Each structure stands twice: as C-alpha cells, then as structure tokens.
Image: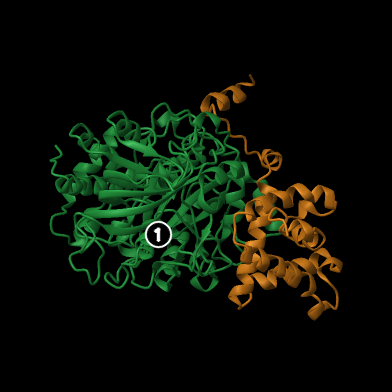
Amino acid sequence: MHPAIHVDVVIIGSGAGGGTVAASLAPLVAAGKRVLLLEKGGRIDPKQLTGAEVESAALHYAHGGAHPTVDRTVTLAYAEGLGGSTLVYTGTSMTPPERVIAGWNLPGLSHADVVKRTEKFAAQNGAAFIPDELINENNWLFQKGCEALGREARQFPINVRGCKGSSLCNLGCPNNAKQGTAQVQIPAAMAQGVEVVTHAQVTALRVGGRGGILDVQVDGAPHPHGSKSAWTAGRYVVHANSVVLAAGAIHSPALLLRSGLTAELPAIGRFWTCHPAHILAGEHDRAIDGFVGHPKSFVWEERVEAERYFLESCMYFPFITAKNLTGFGPDHERLMAAYERLQMILVLACDDALPEQRIDIDGGGQPIVRYKLMPKTIEAMVRGTRAAAEIFFAAGASAVHAPSARPTLIERTENADLNTRITTSQFLPGTISVSAAHFMGGCRMGVSPRDSVTSVRGQVHGHDWLFVADGSLFPTALEINPYLTIMALADHVAQAVADREGHTLT
Amino acid sequence: MDKQQVLGPLARQIQPVLAAFIPATEGLTLAQLAPVLARVDERLAQEPVALQRQLRLFVRILWWLPLLTHLRTMGTLTPAQRLRTLNWLQDCGVTKLRLGLWGLRTLLFLGWYGDPAVQAKLGYRPNVAGWDAWNARKRGD
C-alpha cells in the first residue's frame, strides 16, 4: 500500500465529461488547489494506430466493442483509454434540441445556457462542416436520397483538424485529427498543472472527512500501444475534498452502487437509455468506396419527435458490417462480397427513460446492464428501417438489406411493399444485431432524491462533496449524438465544484 | 483449459457450422481454420469463463442437434441440410437458442471477416493517408 494521497479535487474518468471538468477546473491549480484526474485505461499513441479492425477494436474498446446487455439482445460499444469514448466517436457535433432540454424541466438549466456551452466546446474542438469536395459518395447518396423524397438531410459539423479522410474514426484516428478530450481539454488541463494518472481504476468510494475517500488500483503493465502509468503499480488511497464522477453512464452508476448509496437514492442506475441502433445496407451497381472520407456528415431527423427515430449516414468496417447483416450463408456472403458497393445508413431509436432500464452490479461489483428492447423501441426501429429503405432506393440502390424483413434482402421492385416486408413481427431480438454507443442516464439530474440522483448542478443528493459529470446525468435520451451536451453539462457541474472549493470560474 | 484455447479444440465440430455461415470456408482444412479460430479465441479470452463454457456447450449441442431430425451429426449433413437446420434455429421461438447462434455466428464472422486479407478481397482498402491515397490509386500512381 502506498502512502495516502490528499487532493482537493479528484476526477474519475477522462472522456467528454471528465476531460471537460479537468480543463474547466484547471484554473484552480493556480489558486493553490491540487486537482487529480484518474483514468482506468492507458494513453494511446495515435502514431501507432494501424486501422486494422480487430486489433484496433481490441485496443480501444471494452469487450472488443460488444459489451452485452444482461439479456444479450444489445451490444454496447465504449472505449477505455485517456479520452474515453472521444477516442472512437466520429466527432459528430450537435447542439441539443430545445424540446428535450425543456422536457427535463430542471430549474436553473435552460436550453440557452446549454447551447451557449456547447458552442464554446464546438469552437474549442474546431467543429466545422466538411467541405463538399471532401464529403464521400456514401454520404452524398444519403443526402440525394433524402432530397429525392422531399426530406431535408441536415449536414452537421465534425470536430477535426487536419482530417485526411482515413474513415477510421471509430477505430481511433491514426492522424490525430479528431479533437477529443485527449487532444484538446486534457493537454490544456495538464499544462495548467492538473495531474493525470492513467491505468488507475477506482475500485471503491466512501465518505471521509469533508469529502470522499477512493481506493485506487494502478496497473503497472504498459498499455499495448501507449505509455505506462505515472504512478507505480499498486493500491492507493486518495482523499479528496470534492469527487467528480465522470466514468461514463455505465461505470459511474456502477461505482455509486458499489459505494452502497442504493437505499438512500433508489434512482441510481435507473432510467438508462442508449439510442439502440442498427446498420442498414443498400447495394448499388457501382463502387461507393465508403472507406475513404469522413464516415458521417448527414442526419435526417424530421420524424424524431413523432416517430422516435433518426437516421444518419454511416460507414462501418467489414466485420462490423457482417455482424450487423442479419443471417448467414450464401445470401449473407453475396452481400459481403458487394462490400465496396454498399451504401450504409444507421437507424437510431429514441428509447424511453424507464426505471427498469438500469445499470446494476454483479457479485464482483462489475457493471451489468439490465436493458430490454421495449415494444415501442422496436416499433421505432422498424419505422426507421422503412424510411431508410426508401432513402436507399431513392438514391439508386438495386437492393436493400433490412434486418427486420424475411427474406432480408428487398429488391427494388418491392419498393412499394416496404410496410409489409419490414415488420415488427420479424424483428426478433437475439437474431437481429442491435448495438448502442450513446449511453445516457443512471445518475439522472432532478429535484427529488426519490427519482433522481443529483441536483441540477450534478451534486449527488445528500453528499455535497460528490458530483457526477457525464452522460449519466441525462434525465432522458437526448435524441441526437450526445458528446457536446455531455461537455456542456460537465462544464456546468465544474462551476458547482469550483464554488464548493471557494473559487469562482469565469 | 488455456484461456487462449476456447473454441480451438472444437475445430472439427465448428468446421461444418462455419461452412454454413460462410460458404467460402467450405473445404478449409483444420490447419487453415486455425487462424480463424485463433482470432476468435483471442477475443473470447477477455470474456468470463462461464461464457466460454456456455459457448463450448452450444457448439457441442449444434453438432448433435441434427440427430433429432436427420439421425446424423452436423458434420455429416449436406450443405443444404446444415443451412436449413441453422436457419430454423435462427428464427426459432427459444430466445436462448437464437442468442447462442447469433453469438457463435458473430464470433466466426470476426474470425473470418476480421482477417485483413479477406477484407482486401471484399474491396475494403482503407488507408491512413485517406483521400491522398485514394486519389493516387484512381490516377494509377
């Protein structure tokens, strides 16, 4: 056991939430405060990234990118490493819809304030529209298909600097172009004196003194493609006046559950949502070459409010594509052989925040995800699949692979029959691949400890020293890609932490 | 059992299932199958021992299942019979069986489609240099 470490603020996690808090609180160091950031994963050196699919997924993702829910009908993709899931997102930079923030009905958190903060981080991260000449054919087909149907596909900004169009965003940018927290906020925080320790897993959290006490296990093994921890291997005890939990919407609730606060706050882990998604493929008669250029540029969200889904252009790698195409055998193999001619669209459902959808812990204290695909979610995914099939055909596809159709391949001549070809009765959980990467809830903000975990400032009810600053704060699904909103909320929480530390952030 | 050898020892039982999932693998020898299963085992090594055990049990069930319908093992079915059997499982009413099949299929896809040589044959040619490399290839540089 190493000697106890005393700090003013400890931040657990370095993704969109933790990285932001570290940067926002960095001015406290100049005022004499000690700020420490702990990250479970290693620091990944982009220069060593090859883009090889299986190798890169193993390097970046927990469970190789497929953490299964307890009922195994959904797989969850999230990264572990300095930068968290900002290592592997596409950098899709969206501001949250007003109806969602207004629907949260949280006194002291206005849509205008959240937008103002998202704009700050969008600027900090260099978010901008990709120029037309660098948008690839796969993305244009999505836009053209929408246009032909009278739908308005919206281009969204991407946070890249010096993007070469390798298309490898989801495997970690080998060109270091994507502006995640490991590129922007964490270096800025370190430059101002925030201490960053990787390979450091917080195993327990308890009340102590005026703040919290953390048990930390530091792994001494070097990361396969990165540096070793700044601390020598072993067990540490960290005493902190303020603790900021930003380990993501799976691990933050799990740590709170391990800490034994469940009885006091029954909402811990609950109201968890994830925008369950699946990939659709449309076959064209010519090469699409989706493997060059940024994978995502457009979203179609005109039916998100009424029909609870939205569609995004996307491109995925061969194994992920094979996994997502329903079935196997000659038909599956033939479609895979057409890989370079495939257009792809991602269907994302807006799932309801329900108390039974929750993060739990197993006997060893590890997080498990008790999440079920509810009938309303399945209906939304089926509606989204039909809408995507229409876009594929309008863009010129000769056939569309729809997971919830039997047979799964729909020929162009069947375009008029999509409502009967794609149905909820053919959406068989356990047969259809559903994955998710937008984890929200589990430590939801609110007014009452009966149905929320933190205050609107991210302060855990009844524990003024303990804060949450990640996607687990969301009371409901955000209905867009969440990273900028996570940063905005983390910045908002950082102000509350600074207030507790007697420091006013400007 | 060595954690790196989850499905490797069951190569003979997996061979006909893999061929049904991915017809291009029909006729592969066990030696040729080894790198595919090694990739799967590397992935499975991260998973709990209980899951590894379930998967091995599921492979054995698949091997013997056709005895009920054809009085033969999976290894002696014709390709069409294998495909029909596995398709029946894929859409059957027992969620656990569907999930088992989905899991095995996904792992075998990882073993096969995760191979950079197979990916190149599909026309997947990513390059760290992105547009520069793509344009150079189009120009025939």
* Residue drawn at 49 percent across, 65 percent down: A364
Does dot 1 land on a helix, a strand or a loop? loop
Q: Determine the colour of chain A.
A: green
Q: Is residue A183 left or right of residue A364?
A: left
Q: Residue B135's spot in the image, x, y percent?
A: 56, 24
For label 1, the residue is A274
**Image quadrant occupied by the C terminus of chain A:** top left
Image: B132 above or below B22: above
- For image coordinates 73% across by 52% down, the residue present is B37
Find the residue positioned furthest to the bottom: B68
- Image side of residue A156 versus residue A423, left or right: left
Within 10 Å of disc 1 (Cα), the crowding (few <14, some 14-19, many 20+) is: many
The chain that hosts pointer 1 is A
Give A6 or A458, whichever is nearer the viewer.
A6
Q: Is residue A484 visible?
A: no
Q: Which chain is orange?
A: B
Q: Quadrant of residue B53?
A: bottom right
In the displayed image of the protein, which residue is found farthest to the top?
B141
Q: Is residue A181 above or below residue B49?
A: above
In front: A88, or A350? A88
Instruction: Give the percent coordinates (x, y) of residue A153.
Output: 36, 46
Is residue B61 visible in this depiction of the protein?
yes
Residue B21 x %, y %: 72, 59
Q: Residue at x 48, y 35 (%)?
A: A173
Color encoding of the figure: by chain
Q: Amino acid at mark 1?
A: Cys
